[in-house]
Image (tube, rainbow, N blue to C red):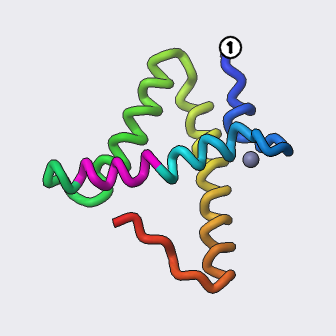
Amino acid sequence: MDVDLKTIVEHDLNDDCPVCRTQDIVEMALIPAASAWEIANGLPRYAIAFHGAAGLLGAVMNEGISREDVETVLAQLLDEIEAQITEDQMMGGPPQGTA
Ligand SMILES: [Zn+2]
């Protein structure tokens, strides 16, 4: 594996953290776009979300990253997101809808 997947999951402790910048792009651009594509194409809710995520990860696997590495990184990211959701809910805010 000649790609350092740690740079994708490990936060850099400065204002220019690539993990945080990526998460901002996903939250501000990708999630609303996926939702809009589902609606515009009459697709079931989350269809683009799941197929888009799987397709993107499939492209990564196609470039030679093992499925095991993909699943390890994905699990780590989902753990972080899940913890963030729990934290947001404990702060009393309503869950953010994407629709
Ligand atoms: Zn960060």
Which residue does the numbered mark 1 point to in the structure image?
Answer: 2
Q: Residues within 10 Å of mark 1 (few under 14, many from 20)?
A: few
Residue under the point 68% across and 29% down: 5
Q: Quadrant of residue 88?
A: bottom right
Which image quarter is the C terminus in? Answer: bottom left
When the figure is inspected, residue 87 is found, relative to residue 68, above or below; the finding is below
Q: Main secondary structure of the magenta part?
A: helix
Residue under the point 81% across and 40% down: 12
Give coordinates of residue 25: x percent, y percent: 54, 44
User: Which segment is the magenta one?
Assistant: 29-38
Residue under the point 53% across and 30% down: 67
Frontmost residue, 97 versus 47: 97
Frontmost residue, 45 versus 62: 45
Tell me the SS state at disc 1. loop
Frontmost residue, 24 versus 50: 24
Callout 1 amino acid: Asp
Q: Is residue 72 magenta?
A: no
Q: Quadrant of residue 18?
A: top right
Residue under the point 60% across and 41% down: 22
